[in-house]
Image (tube, rainbow, N blue to C red):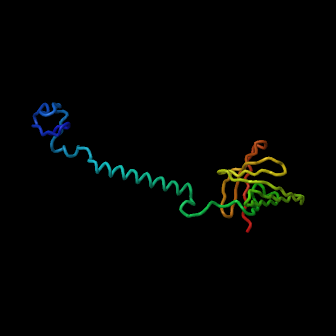
Amino acid sequence: MQCKNCDTQMPADALFCGTCGKKTDELIPAENAMQLVEPDRRQKTKILMGAALAGTAIVILLALFLWPGLLRNQEPASLVGRWEVVEGTDLDFFAHTMEFFDDGSGRMASSLLFGLAVTEEFTWQLNGGRLVITSQTLGFGLTYDLVELSADRLIYEARIPVLGTIIRAEYQRVR
């Protein structure tokens, strides 16, 4: 037998360890002694390094899925340019074009059902996942949730509490 406490070899019939005084029920058979010894410092280091590497790999994979342009060296798509509403969306009942300029200004042109043309000047800014457009004529701003902004496609949604609905607008870039 071998003492768990002090590793002293003991006779099989011993009731107590002669070195530290532990009871024999706290002793382990000599043939099993090597199996129950704690891992050495190198094994612990290997385990910790493996866990750290696995954790790092998980973080990198999550970043790639949550931020697709990360490894492609791409800047986020720019809103600057001219956009036309896509048929079949909530705003296609009139011809609608929006143009966003580098300086944060913009212009919206609409042709309503009876041929009435309306042009509106506005300022704009992207704030996180939101597009804020402030009308120069009306003097107030509207905030839209960006659903998608890519090189050729712009989709945003706006809650209209008065109507109890959500308007979804989809645009394609005009080249």
| Quadrant where the N terminus is found in the figure | top left
> For the point 65% across and 61% down, which residue is it?
77
Residue 65, given in percent of the width and then of the height, sits at 54, 56
Residue 18, given in percent of the width and then of the height, sits at 11, 33
Q: Residue furthest front?
A: 103
> Which image quadrant is residue 21 in?
top left
> For the point 82% across and 48% down, which residue is it?
139
> For the point 13% across and 34% down, which residue is it?
19
**Left or right of residue 62: residue 159:** right
Residue 93, given in percent of the width and then of the height, sits at 81, 57
* Front-lying residue, 88 or 30: 30
**Left or right of residue 123: residue 59:** left
> For the point 73% across and 55% down, which residue is it?
169
47 vs 171: above or below: above
**Left or right of residue 74: residue 41:** left
* Front-lying residue, 140 or 155: 140
> Which image quadrant is residue 82 in?
bottom right
Task: State how many labels appear.
Answer: 0
* Front-lying residue, 77 or 169: 77
> Which image quadrant is residue 36 in?
top left
| Quadrant where the C terminus is found in the figure | bottom right
